[in-house]
Image: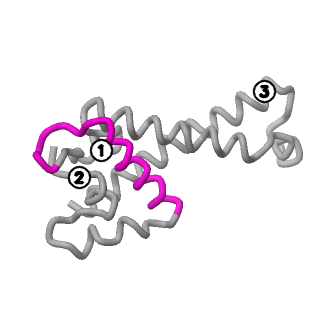
Amino acid sequence: RPIARLAAGLVDVALLASIDLIVVSLTARIAGLALTREDLLVIPPLPMAAFFLVLAFLYLVGFTVGGGQTVGQMALGVKVVGDDQHGVDLTGAVVHSLGTLISVCTLGALFVPVFFTADCRAVYDRLAGTRVVAA
């Protein structure tokens, strides 16, 4: 299960990165910029990064609340459930999603316990009252 979680996360990162590249390309096109390094440096990086972060957060929360699975989790056959084995409420999804993003930004620091604990839960799973199970 830890490997499936990791692989699902990589699928989601690839999907979100693809969307981010499309957004950058469209932004450049709207601004009349070429897709060159010099032209792309004109785009303010902090607002764009903040937009990408909000987009990733909404993706994670939306899919987690909506059905317990992101696209990557659907592809790898895992889903997020509450400690009661039922769906995740909005608060749990927000905490789980924030933890996921923080874990990605820290190169997996909050995810490491998945590989060393019997219940395969990340730090943010414990905080959110969630767990990842086979779908």
Residue 44 lies left or right of residue 18; in this view the side is right
| Quadrant into which the C terminus falls | top left
Mark 3 / mark 1, whichever is N-terminal = 3
Contact (CB < 8 A) between labels 3 and 2? no
Local secondary structure at mark 3:
helix
Location of residue 21 with respect to 111 vertically, above or below? above
Contact (CB < 8 A) between labels 1 and 2? yes
Q: Which residue is mark 1?
A: 92
Q: Position of residue 122 (x, y in %)?
A: 30, 63
Q: Report the span colored magenta.
A: 83-105
- Residue under the image location 28 percent in, 57 percent down: 125
Mark 1 / mark 2, whichever is N-terminal = 1
Q: Which residue is mark 3?
A: 29
Q: CA distance from mark 3 to mark 2?
A: 43 Å
Mark 3 / mark 2, whichever is N-terminal = 3
Q: Nearer the viewer, residue 129 or 1?
A: 129
Q: Which residue is mark 2?
A: 129
Dot 3 amino acid type: Arg
Which quadrant of the view contains residue 111? bottom left
Q: Nearer the viewer, residue 86 or 78?
A: 86
Local secondary structure at mark 1:
helix
